[in-house]
Image (cartoon, grey):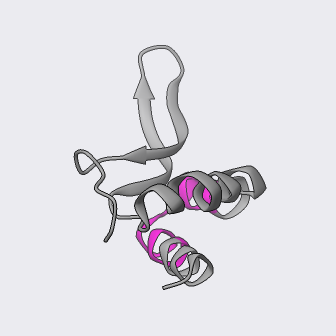
Amino acid sequence: MSFDTAYSEFMVEHQKMRRGESLRRLQQGHGYAEKLFLEHVWWPAFGHFDGVHPEYEVYDFKDGTRYLDFCHTSGTPQASN
């Protein structure tokens, strides 16, 4: 599968799972630099987006909610063969 196809499917999948501010940030805040990171760093290293969550919502003790550009949540990522 090509990067462009995998990236499109990845974004559609995450947009279907989001609501409210999280969805808005994913649609408007996930942009050029984030895509470049995935294309030139993540994809060559791992060849998939399993466990990667864009615009990941976290809570802090001071201001409430923050959004990470990416979070990997399924243990150590394994390169595809």
Residue depicted at x 29% and y 47%: 73
What is the tally of numbered marks visible in this picture?
Answer: 0
Quarter location, residue 17: bottom left
Quarter placement of the C terminus = bottom left
Q: Is 62 displayed left or right of 25 in the figure?
A: left
In front of the other: 81 or 67: 81
Depicted 36 relative to depicted 67: above or below: below
Q: Is residue 12 magenta?
A: yes
Left or right of 38? Residue 13 is left
Instruction: Farthest residue to the front: give it.
Output: 81
Is residue 69 covered in magenta?
no
- Residue at point 55%, 82% (across, down): 2
The furthest residue to the left = 75
Residue 34: percent from left, percent from top: 66, 52
Near-viewer residue (26 or 32): 32
- The secondary structure that dominates the magenta segment is helix
Residue 56 lies, in percent from the top left, at 46, 46
For the point 52% across and 61% down, the residue is 44
Q: Which of the two residues, 11 or 57, is positioned nearer the viewer here?
A: 11
- Residue 18's spot in the image, x, y percent? 46, 64
Q: Please provide the residue range marked out in magenta.
A: 11-26
Q: How far from the left and from the top, in percent, is residue 11?
A: 54, 71
Is residue 59 placed above or below 1 in the rendered structure?
A: above
Residue toward you, 32 or 67: 32
Check the image and report above or below for 59 versus 14.
above
Q: Is residue 49 left or right of residue 73?
A: right
Q: Is residue 5 above or below residue 57?
A: below
- Tell which residue pokes out farthest to the right in this image: 32
Instruction: Name, please, the residue furthest toward the top.
Output: 62
| Residue found at x 57% / y 51% | 41
